């Protein structure tokens, strides 16, 4: 059996967790909107056409912020097509996903939906095929009190009070050749800066996210962030990061090691932010919005065969297995371990499209990746302790990968301490210890474990509870030392409280 040791100190705090790291994403893509969150003709629909079964699952995930309307979709989107009386809205082609968009659901419906879900909106503006003026007009429509053309248009559409959307993304993946209206770093930097200036003139209370790189190994990485920040440092607040991982090679140890790549990616982006800060003698720090992250690859073959120019096809409908849940758990741990820098993050996406929640005409169910996200968003609140993990490692393409990913979160308000850990050893148990004498009056309340003997096991509508967590872990406290024997290939949440 391998041994791992977590070292913490009550006073040695990494940073406060911004609850927005448990954000998610709804794009006009596949069945995320239509049939996912909105289906007026469904028996599950409420009076606004929102699916109540999906809503309940989203609420359990406690998603504080949801990015909308894309994604690649936003780069061809005219927001005006999706507001006003539904019978007057027309269908449009969507170049990003080569489908037809009916516009029956738009920005106002999304704001209503987020209110019911208990979330805030992270709105993206189109900087692919549109520019400063359209972004300004959308902001005016959403946030201006009234008495101007666009704010009065909102009132005419039934929304007397402004939506007051605080968080805005300046385009999406503008470095990517797949993006409609891709830009060079210089082109994007100028446009983003001028758009940011205009938007903040209209509403100085908003926060803006500039596009970073679309993935860690894209050719332009590094120079892209530097050039964008050199131009936009004063006008933006965050730089975005996006990253999806796959197991196309069908090599589980390599796949599970990818959290090491994510960790390095965050460190590198933070270093570039700091370089520009130093060069400009700036006091302000640019933080990170990791606004797209997940596992994504299972649906690639099926997607390549899809008929084009239809509405809401079954697109990007990855069926997640148990090993995906383990990596998602590790990615959540990685985000937490950078809580001092990553202030927002969005699991991409939320419903039907590379999502933790799936729907059909007869119901909604939870994919495997639903559970680590549920545990992290529900129990991973408070401050992250500067957790040192001593554990054996294995050699992987990304470098030395620890057999365990772990983080400790302290919630002073609730007097709770939570250890999240992924055991990546696929065959052997691992003994985990942690000296908790500083928490002398704490007791273990539960040790949640998610394990399945088959890393390829999935949940389906017919078998929705094939891979589920249980609280049958064996963590115990003895003389101030916590010991847990972790199952091979397992997601663990050990909760202690006073
Ligand atoms: O989330 C799916 C797609 O992935 C998004 O539209 C895009 O931003 C990214 O490439």
Image: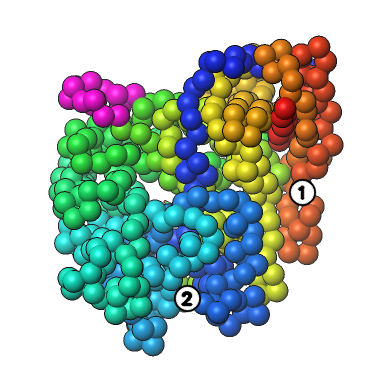
Q: Is residue 50 visible?
A: yes
**Residue 17 higher or lower than 59, as above or below:** above
Gap between marks 1 and 2 measured at Cα: 32 Å
Nearer the observer, 457 or 242: 242
**Which residue is pictured at 61% across the width and 64% down the height?**
54
Give me the disc on residue 311.
2
**Residue at which label 1 appears:** 467
Please tell me in which quadrant of the rendered image residue 299 appears: bottom right
Q: Secondary structure at mark 2?
A: loop
Nearer the observer, 92 or 64: 64
Evaluate if marks 1 and 2 touch, with contact meaning CB atoms under 8 Å apart: no
User: Which stretch is magenta?
Assistant: 271-285
Check if residue 280 falls in the magenta segment.
Answer: yes
Nearer the observer, 114 or 92: 114
Furthest residue to the bottom?
Answer: 87
Going by the image, does 89 lie left or right of 469? Answer: left
| Image x and y of residue 366, in percent | 68, 56
Q: Secondary structure at mark 1?
A: loop
**Which residue is pictured at 30% across the width and 29% down the height?**
285
| Image x and y of residue 93, in percent | 35, 74
**Which residue is pictured at 66% across the width and 42% down the height?**
375
Categorize mark 2 by other alpha carbons within 10 Å: few (<14), some (14-19), many (20+).
Answer: some
Mark found first going from the N terminus, 1 or 2: 2
**Residue 351 higher or lower than 22, as above or below:** below
| Image x and y of residue 246, in percent | 56, 43
Going by the image, does 314 lie left or right of 471? Answer: left
Query: Which part of the image, by quadrant, shows the C terminus?
Result: top right
| Image x and y of residue 241, in percent | 39, 40
């Amino acid at each position: 059996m391998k041994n791992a040791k977590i070292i913490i100190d009550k006073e040695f705090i990494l940073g406060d967790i911004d609850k927005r790291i448990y954000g998610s994403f709804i794009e006009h893509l596949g069945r995320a909107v239509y049939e996912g969150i909105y289906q007026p003709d469904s028996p599950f629909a409420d009076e606004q056409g929102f699916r109540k079964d999906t809503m309940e699952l989203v609420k359990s995930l406690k998603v504080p912020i949801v990015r909308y309307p894309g994604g690649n979709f936003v780069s061809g989107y005219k927001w005006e097509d999706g507001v006003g009386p539904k019978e007057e809205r027309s269908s449009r082609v969507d170049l990003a996903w080569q489908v037809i968009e009916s516009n029956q659901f738009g920005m106002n419906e999304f704001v209503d939906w987020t209110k019911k879900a208990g979330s805030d909106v992270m709105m993206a503006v189109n900087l692919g095929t549109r520019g400063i003026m359209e972004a300004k007009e959308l902001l005016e429509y959403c946030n201006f009190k009234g008495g101007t053309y666009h704010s009065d248009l909102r009132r005419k559409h039934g929304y007397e009070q402004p939506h007051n959307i605080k968080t805005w993304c300046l385009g999406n993946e503008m470095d990517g050749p797949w993006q409609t209206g891709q830009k060079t770093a210089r082109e994007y930097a100028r446009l983003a800066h001028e758009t940011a200036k205009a938007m903040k003139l209209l509403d100085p209370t908003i926060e803006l996210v500039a596009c970073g790189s679309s993935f860690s190994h894209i050719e332009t990485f590094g120079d892209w962030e530097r050039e964008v920040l050199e131009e936009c440092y004063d006008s933006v607040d965050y730089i975005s990061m996006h990253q999806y991982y796959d197991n196309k090679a069908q090599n589980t140890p390599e796949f599970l090691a990818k959290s090491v790549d994510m960790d390095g990616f965050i460190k590198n982006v933070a270093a570039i932010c700091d370089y520009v800060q130093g060069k400009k003698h700036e006091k302000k720090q640019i933080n990170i919005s990791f606004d797209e992250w997940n596992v994504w690859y299972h649906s690639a073959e099926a997607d390549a065969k899809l008929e084009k120019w239809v509405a809401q096809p079954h697109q990007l409908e990855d069926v997640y297995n148990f090993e995906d849940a383990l990596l998602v758990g590790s990615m959540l741990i990685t985000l937490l371990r950078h809580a001092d820098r990553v202030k927002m993050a969005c699991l991409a996406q939320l419903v039907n499209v590379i999502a933790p929640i799936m729907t059909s005409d007869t119901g909604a169910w939870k994919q495997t990746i639903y559970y680590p996200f549920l545990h992290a968003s529900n129990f991973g609140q408070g401050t992250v302790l500067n957790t040192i993990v001593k554990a054996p490692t294995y050699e992987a393409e990304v470098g030395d990968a620890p057999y365990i990913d772990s983080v400790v979160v302290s919630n002073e308000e609730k007097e709770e301490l939570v250890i999240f850990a992924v055991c990546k050893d696929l065959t052997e148990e691992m003994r985990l210890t942690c000296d908790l004498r500083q928490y002398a009056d704490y007791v273990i309340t539960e040790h949640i474990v998610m394990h399945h003997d088959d890393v390829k096991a999935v949940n389906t509508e017919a078998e929705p509870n094939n891979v589920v967590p249980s609280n049958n872990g064996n963590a115990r406290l003895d003389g101030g030392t916590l010991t847990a024997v972790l199952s091979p290939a397992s997601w663990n949440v050990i909760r202690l409280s006073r």
